[in-house]
Image: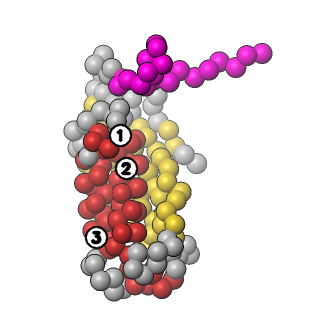
Amino acid sequence: MTKKRAKLSHVSHDGSARMVDVSAKAETARSARARGTIRMTMDAFEAIRSQQIGKGDVLSVARLAGIMAAKRTADLIPLCHPLLLEDVQVELTADPSLPGIVAESQVRTTGRTGVEMEAIVAVTVALVTVYDMAKSADRGMVIGDISLTEKTGGRSGTYVNH
């Protein structure tokens, strides 16, 4: 029994990379959520939480960096369509059980292609910004667990990562 191979949408008939043509797709409401973490020492965690990092308010700056990154995703991911985003939310939560920060994003638009990459990029850049701002307190911080947690809209419908 031969397993059917999934067709990759960004590969042309000759095997070269290409941007997907979405011109025939209907515009629909689309949204995506992503999540990730940065783990650190308890001392670094407490310094961020008490706003004792010399560079300033780490979580506010990281939130803004995530929003800005979502808007620039097509500049970072070569075959990603530039999209008019209608809403970008980034939330950073201090979690002492890690210890570290949990970043979550939600991105919305009405368009012909989804916003999954924008949500993932928002979380990633927010977490990298936390690292940049707090590296003086802990150079061993670990960024991870970045994933798409939900997407809605489009031909494939709703996806929820359990």
According to the picture, the residue beneath numbered tag 2 turns out to be 121
Nearest to the observer: residue 52 or residue 105: 52
Q: Nearer the viewer, residue 22 or 135?
A: 135
**What x and y, as percent, mark residue 140?**
51, 73
Identify the element where label 2 is drawn. helix
Q: Looking at the image, is 88 positioned above or below residue 63?
A: above
Q: Of tags 1 and 2, which is closer to the observer?
A: 1
Residue type, numbered disc 1: Ile
Regarding residue 109, the answer to whether it shows in the image is no
Image quadrant of residue 126? bottom left
Residue that carries the numbered disc 3 in the rendered image:
60
Q: Nearer the viewer, residue 147 or 152?
A: 147
Q: How far across and down, in percent of the image, does residue 2 sit? A: 73, 16
Tell me the magenta residue range.
Answer: 1-20
Q: Residues within 10 Å of mark 3 (few under 14, many from 20)?
A: some
- Going by the numbered disc 3, the residue's amino acid type is Ser
Q: Amino acid at mark 2?
A: Val
